[in-house]
Each structure stands twice: as structure tokens, then as C-alpha cells.
Image: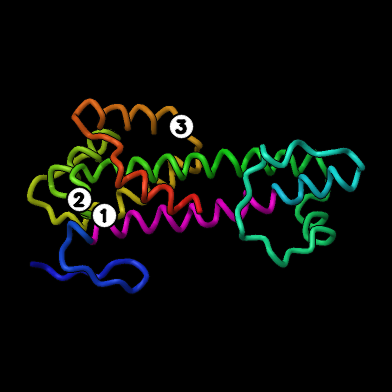
Amino acid sequence: MLCGIGTVGHVWADQETELFQGFRQHVQAQISKDKREFSIADVCTVWFYRHQHVKPGSEAQQVRFSFIQQMDPTQECAKRYPRGLEAAREGFGKAQQELSLSLTFFQMALVGDGDDNQQYSEREVHDVLESFGLPFQKGEPLGRYMGDLTRLFDKIRSDIQFQFLMESMQTLMKKGYRFTGADQSALNQELH
């Protein structure tokens, strides 16, 4: 077995685990940032509504994350969104779209681990890369694909390429990959 160094100081026993865990952590880090931006935009949108004495929508319809505890909306919202409510709405829409894409890509990363063993086999790496139209070289160390996968995620997220992401997910599904109960549990952890 090879010893690999993963992201954030983690050490994993082999390249299959290193690739899966490192890629997963890269996407999770972005999800955390996206949830924070979503929460800020949500708080500011509600704050601007209240500031203008317009009643916001039902609390039951609003999604909240517990990131924004000590934020002073009076200063933070005016600084982030100097154009007021319209800018906050735009920020909310953008943050919602980015968070949704990051979470969907996280699902894709989970689905790519077809046997739910928390690592990518050579076949799984091949199938994930192929689903995105990326080359796979049999016999290459699997760890070499970490950069390919993280750059792919960053590019798809930057360009908000939902259609490409969903087509790639469909390609994996056609090969027999499924979103399992274990995948759902991992996704639920990201949502909370």
C-alpha cells in the first residue's frame, strides 16, 4: 500500500482513499463558503425588507443556516449591498445558485463512489472522468487525478454549468451508479 498525504493534514493509507477524501473535502470546503454567503444574503434581504417596512415571506419558506450569529445587519448589509434590497436579492439569488451547484456536485462525487467504501477504485475514477469527458490513463497513479477533479469542480462552479453537471451525472447513472442511502446521509450532514 502506498501512503498518501491528503488535504488539510490528513494522512490516508492509499491513493484510492486519498483521491476520494481529498476531492470530497475540496467540494465540502466550497459548500461551507457557499452556505455562509447564502446565509448572509438571506439575513440582509430580510433586513432590507424589514428596514423598508415590507413584510417578508413566511418563515416556514425560508432556509436558514446557523452561520450568522454575531452579524450586525445594520453595518454588514449596507456594506455588502450598498444598493439596498435589489442588490441583496441579486446576492441571494447568486448565492442560492452557487450553493445548489456545489451540493449537486457533492452528490456527483458521492455517486462516483459506487460501492460506498469512501474511496475511488480505478474503475470508479475512470467512470467519473469519462462522464465529464476527461481522459483516463490506465496504470497512472490515481492521486494524479486530484488536480483534474478539483479544477473541473472549480470550473463548473465558476461557470454555473448545471446542464453539463446533470448530463455527467446521467452518464454515471447509465453505467449503474446510484444515489444510495449512504450518499443521502453524507449529503444530509452537509445540509446541517
Residue 180: x and y, percent?
28, 40
Say whether marks 1 and 3 touch (CB < 8 Å): no
Q: Is residue 165 above or below residue 95?
A: above
Mark 2 → mark 1, Cα distance in angstroms: 6 Å
- The image quadrant of residue 84 is top right
- Coloration mode: rainbow
Q: Secondary structure at mark 2?
A: loop
Q: Amino acid at mark 1?
A: Phe
Foreground pick, 78 / 61: 61
Residue 132 location in percent, x, y?
30, 35
**Which residue is rendered at x = 36% and y = 51% of the image?**
186
Between the residue at mark 1 and the residue at mark 3, the CA separation in whole angstroms equals 22 Å
Q: Which residue is mark 2?
A: 120
- Check disc 3 and report its element: helix, strand or loop: helix
Of discs 2 and 3, which sits in the foreground?
Answer: 2
Q: Which one is earlier in the sequence, the residue at label 2 or at label 1?
A: 1
> Magenta part of the protein: which range?
18-41
Q: Which residue is mark 1?
A: 20
> Which residue lies at the image location 50% right of the left edge and 36% below the top edge?
160
The quarter of the rendered structure image containing the N terminus is bottom left
Query: Does label 2 or label 3 sit earlier along the sequence?
Result: 2
Amino acid at the residue labelled 3:
Phe
Q: Is disc 1 placed on a helix, strand or loop?
A: helix
Q: Is residue 160 left or right of residue 148?
A: right
Read off the residue under disc 3: 162
Image-based side of 19 in relation to 164, left or right = left
Characterize the magenta stretch by its predominant secondary structure: helix
What is the x, y in percent for residue 165? 39, 33
Labelled pair 2, 1 in contact (Cβ < 8 Å): yes
Label 2 is placed on what type of residue? Tyr
Q: Nearer the viewer, residue 139 or 67?
A: 67
Q: CA distance from mark 2 to mark 3?
A: 23 Å
